[in-house]
Image (spheres, coloured by chain):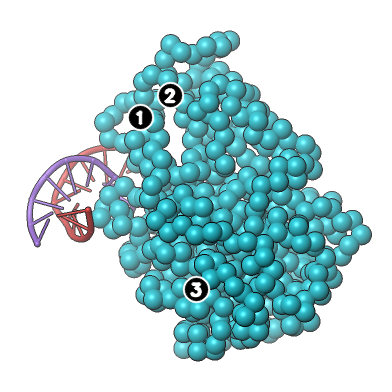
Chain colours: A cyan, B purple, C red
Amino acid sequence: RQPKRHLTGFSVRACAPHHGGVPGDILPPLLAPLCLLAAELDHSKLFLCLSRNPLYKSNSSIKREMTFPAFQQEDVKSDISQKLPDQQFLLFTTKEEDLKTAETKKANRAHEYEKENTRSVCLLEQKRKVVSSNIDVPPARKSSEELDMDKVTAAMVLTSLSTSPLVRSPPVRPNESLNGSWKEGGFVPSSTSSSGYWSWNAPSDQSNPSTPSPPLSADSFKAFRTPSQPDDGIDEAETSNLLFDEPIPRKRKNSMKVMFKCLWKNCGKVLSTAAGIQKHIRTVHLGRVGESDYSDGEEDFYYTEIRLNTDSVADGLSSLSPVSPSLASPPSFPTQDAIRPETSCAKTETKLMTPLSRSAPTNLYLVHTDHAYQATPPVNIPGSAKFTPNGSSFSISWQSPPVTFTGIPVSPTHNRPAGSGEQKQSHTVLSSPPRVAFGLRKPRGEGKKCRKVYGMENRDMWCTACRWKKACQRFID
DNA sequence: GCTGCCGGGCT
DNA sequence: AGCCCGGCAGC
């Protein structure tokens, strides 16, 4: 056993559901961002606990505890892949004592937790406290801005799990210190910590229809919280909205700017309307000029909807389908340039978010991107993320299990599975699209596949198809 | 050369 | 159907 080293910055804890699916399918989307988070934040070690009991009702439910370098994700995955089939939940933290803390807290409130079929409740915690050293950059030397950057990055990483349009921004509270409100209201006993909640609703369930279950309710969430816990500064409705992702178009409309990004190779043009991006594709990529009807042949639109967290009014999805009902927006379109394991990408995102942290330093705000886990475009994980720029907390929620590809609709153009978050809005009238028109062989996928993501040494983590040397079903292009 | 994955064989 | 793998082809 490696020596346990408590590092600084943030701790992360989470419990994840088994979801009745293949562990390898559910865990990578959770683990990778968390490992990334830890790596991004403090290069810490992470502690992992697996438990069959989602409530951690007894200490004995902690089956395993281990440490691992945050950067060595494969080790964790490998271990989990071995352990999880008979486990259901895992607890995941950067600090060993957090395991026990969570254990105790969950045991205390377990009796309130009545929704047996609730898939999971995940906790996510950040801590500012320097627990001990052994880090590359002592946090004390970090400026507050750097910390904010870290947290923004963290939020972005974690938000990469979220691809839902059902994202709402909490009301702006100009005079409220979120640090205080969350810290005081948090369930974490340590005075130096603050907390967020991370819930995972039952699937609706596009990906695993054989295991339907009612979604996590707001009540069950509340039950999960410590009874003596005062309101943490966020009203119940808001909390419920945030965590349980009930559609509230009003808030979303007011907080999200919808843009449309061209997915043609080496383009990436972003326009504000679907019509605009379609026109762009017609004129620039399809070579059509000034035409309004293209029924004479094929027409492909490869673009994606992206949402920016702004307060400006976006016209939402209503403008998305000017051409054909087939272009009507599904719930979300994960972008092709979803957050990848490379930190550079997260840094890029950070650049986008940083001005927000400066312009609204005391406000609770929401970040949302249409990212799927790593570069897994079709994975649709409706959810939302909340993040406080001053370091208090953030929370994430989503509804669907991240990865499972059973029962997925088939693209009319490409006869292959495409997730519910199909990102290529391919609208083909007659013939096949240019990309696949020539050559019988399907173009090889450009995204990372299981082999690349998990490595040969973790072949058991691959999707079945990859293991059989078939077209990858997890990281579909 | 690496890697995705098709085609096909085996159980 | 599940599993495996030779070999092609894109990068």
Q: Is residue A242 visible?
A: yes
The chain containing the residue under callout 1 comes to A
Residue type at mark 3 is: Phe
Which residue is painted at 37% across and 34% down in the image?
A414
Say the numbered circle drawn on residue A428.
2
Find the distance from the CA under tag 1 to the CA under tag 3. 42 Å
Would residue A453 appear left or right of A102 to someone viewing this image?
A: left
Where is mark 1, residue-wise?
A: A436
Which residue is painted at 51% across and 56% down in the image?
A203
Asked if residue A107 is positioned above or below residue A244 in the image, the reply reads: below
The x and y percentages for residue A178 are: 82, 65
Q: Residues within 10 Å of mark 1 (few under 14, many from 20)?
A: few
Where is mark 3, residue-wise?
A: A89
Which residue is painted at 80% across and 62% down in the image?
A234
Q: How many labels were placed on the picture?
A: 3
Helix, strand or loop under label 1: helix
Q: Quadrant of the C terminus of chain A?
A: top left
Instruction: Name the front one of labels 2 and 1.
Output: 2
Q: Are marks 2 and 3 on the same chain?
A: yes
Would residue A158 appear left or right of A71 to someone viewing this image?
A: right
Instruction: Name the front one of labels 2 and 3.
Output: 3
Mark closest to the chain's N terminus, 2 or 3: 3
Q: Are marks 1 and 3 on the same chain?
A: yes
Q: Are marks 1 and 3 in contact (CB under 8 Å)?
A: no
The x and y percentages for residue A11 are: 65, 75
Find the distance from the CA under tag 2 to the CA under tag 3. 43 Å
Helix, strand or loop under label 3: strand
Q: Residues within 10 Å of mark 3 (few under 14, many from 20)?
A: many
Residue type at mark 2 is: Thr
The chain containing the residue under callout 2 comes to A
Helix, strand or loop under label 2: loop
